[in-house]
Amino acid sequence: QTGCFYGLPQIRARPQYPKLPHDGKADVTKEQSGNCRKYYETYSQKCLTGGIMACWCTHSICYGFHCIPVAEGRNDVFSAMITRWPKAPSRVVYDFACALGPYCWTREPEFFADTQFVIDGFHAPGHTKCSPAAFLKTYSAVDAELIHLNSSAAECGNSGMTRIRKSVSYMVQAHAILYCWVFISVWNCTQILSLYKKASELL
């Protein structure tokens, strides 16, 4: 009914920021923050029921998702974290981290004080005017542990969800969301079993 399925319960409401213009509105036009002119990508722009935004861990396991009526934007990612996460993630890998970081720090500087926002290697080439500070590869050059970070986990998960895009496009919203939930649940179980199998092979 809510169009929202997360493994983490909602622990707070999304704060309102009346002094910030256009706060809470979707990013449906070209990103105008700083020097970045890259368009925000959408999960399912052609889907008749809109689309969903999913949050993934580095093992391509989905934390949850919520329905989005239009193109995915910074507000969707910010709202998911501020309403569900007891403590902000230490690192957020996102296509438009160059814009998401300032968006989050402006609204909740204390909550996101220790959060690093970085663009994964796959999407970095498109950000020709963004600072190197926004790229994961910048930090990987000085921190060997980050070299092994699966920064394409979300891309892998979202790619997997394209398998159900056509089916979902013919469903009413309630059925589409339930169908996505079932698919993601099966996907997560498969990923977890795969991790256990890899771990047992190392023993």
Image (cartoon, helix red, strand yellow):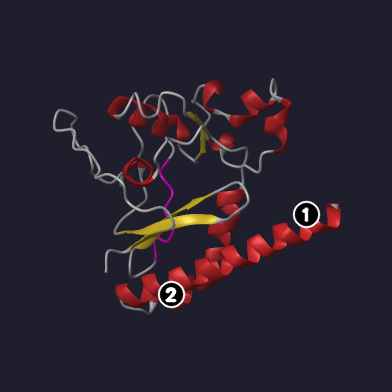
Residue at image coords 72%, 38% = 148
Q: Is residue 46 above or below residue 70?
A: below
Dot in front, 2 or 1: 1
Residue occupying the far left of the picture: 18
| Disc 2 element | helix
- Does residue 136 appear to the left or right of 31 in the view shown? right
**Amino acid at dot 2:** Tyr
Query: In this rendering, does residue 164 appear at all?
Result: yes
Q: Magenta segment, which residues?
A: 39-46
User: Which residue in the protein does label 2 denote?
Assistant: 179
| Disc 1 element | helix
Quadrant for the N terminus in the image? bottom left
Question: For the stretch drawn in magenta, what is the main secondary structure?
Answer: loop
**Amino acid at dot 1:** Ala
Residue at image coords 60%, 54% = 60
Residue at image coords 18%, 37% = 16
Residue nearest the viewer, comparing 176 with 72: 176
- Give percent across and percent down for residue 85: 40, 43
| Quadrant of the rendered image containing residue 67 | bottom left
User: Which residue in the protein does label 1 denote?
Assistant: 199
